[in-house]
Image: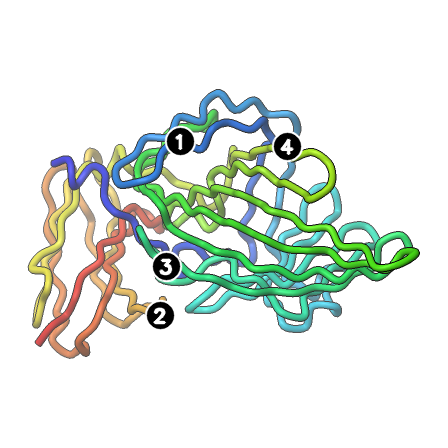
Amino acid sequence: MCSVSIAQPTLTATGMNPVIGNSYTVESANYVSPGSSGASQTWNLSSMSGTSSSTANAVSPGSTTYGGSFPNSNLAWTNTGGDAIYYKTSNTALQFYGVASGTTVLSYSNPEDQLHFPFTYNNTYSDTWAVNFNSGGYTVYRKGTTNVTADSYGTLVTPAGTFTNVLRIHFVQNYQDSIYVMGPQIVTYNNDEYIWYKEGTHVQLATVYTLTPSTGSPTTSGTYTTTTSGINEFSGILSSSDLFPNPASDKVTIDFSLTENQKVNVRLINVIGEQLNINQNTNGVQGENRIQLDVADLSEGIYFAQIVLNGNIAATKRFVISK
């Protein structure tokens, strides 16, 4: 029962890429300790105190003022302050292409990978990126490397609520700004950041970071998401779930228990985040339920079964097909 209640989550392109029309509200907050790494953790960030809030909406880049500066992006988050953050979503990665804030435009010549898919506990990658921009009439040349590790999973507590089956990702960014002002000037930065994600929410649940420049004092801060069109916490409705056999060859069975009646859809996702044409719909009833899927025609490899309640992903099960 413990392995069911604190499952090892996997982030997929379907569950995490934002979609045009999504929206969320985030609260800027004080820094709190990110807590421990490892399996089955509980992180208590409830002491975060909000200082200001902002609502973000996912829109087409072409609908924004500076969308033409980001021809490779396919989605932008706009906030109540008028800023726009540009991304490219795909089956394998969520890439950051830059930001427009006021008249300052940072368009990356080499985008930064925000997430890789699928991504689960102990997965890691390294990504290099670069961007030039104008500041005070001078051109700033920024380049860096980001090292990303899914260092833990478990239950997250924020002022907005409690979320189960959360994956924490540790971002370590090392970058430098080069500028010529009465001679060459170089400032280096280290950003040590933790971000908590839940499959199916399309946005981060919370962040804390420490930014340390080579000149000046470190900056610490945090955020937590208060409301979003993507977050739906169904841990109280989907009280347990199991998939077997694993590995499988011709059929997989999914057992799950509901605390109330729900429309249930189980769909299959391949390793690059594509939804397959194998799915099963049912009217789930309170108590024990069972769905069986025919996977005999699928190739050997890794797959993910998503349990969807009333259109929202409640759980993702990883399994292997071996023949």
Amino acid carrying mark 2 in the image:
Ile
Amino acid carrying mark 3 in the image:
Thr
Residue picked out by circle 1: 35
Image location of residue 272, percent across then percent down = 35, 70
- Real-space CA distance between mark 3 and mark 1, rounded to the nearest whole angstrom: 25 Å
Marks 2/3 in contact by CB < 8 Å: the verdict is: no
Q: Which mark is residue 206?
A: none
**Which residue shows up at 15% across the image and 79% down it?**
297
Q: Which mark is residue 12?
A: 3
- Real-space CA distance between mark 2 and mark 1, rounded to the nearest whole angstrom: 31 Å
Image location of residue 84, percent across then percent down = 69, 53
Marks 3/4 in contact by CB < 8 Å: the verdict is: no
Kind of element beneath mark 1: loop
For residue 63, side relative to residue 252 (left or right): right
Residue picked out by circle 4: 53
Going from N to C along the chain, the mark reached first, 4 or 2, is 4
Image location of residue 262, percent across then percent down = 25, 43
Question: Between tags 2 and 1, which lies in front?
Answer: 1
- Real-space CA distance between mark 4 and mark 2, rounded to the nearest whole angstrom: 35 Å
Residue picked out by circle 2: 272
Marks 2/1 in contact by CB < 8 Å: the verdict is: no
> Dot 2 surroundings within 10 Å: few (below 14), some, or many (20 or more)?
some
Amino acid carrying mark 1 in the image:
Gly
Question: Between tags 4 and 2, which lies in front?
Answer: 2
- Real-space CA distance between mark 1 and mark 4, rounded to the nearest whole angstrom: 24 Å
**Which residue shows up at 23% across the image and 38% down it?**
6
- Real-space CA distance between mark 2 and mark 3, rounded to the nearest whole angstrom: 8 Å
Quarter the N terminus occupies: top left
Going from N to C along the chain, the mark reached first, 1 or 4, is 1
**Which residue shows up at 38% across the image and 58% down it?**
124
Kind of element beneath mark 2: loop
Q: How many marks?
A: 4
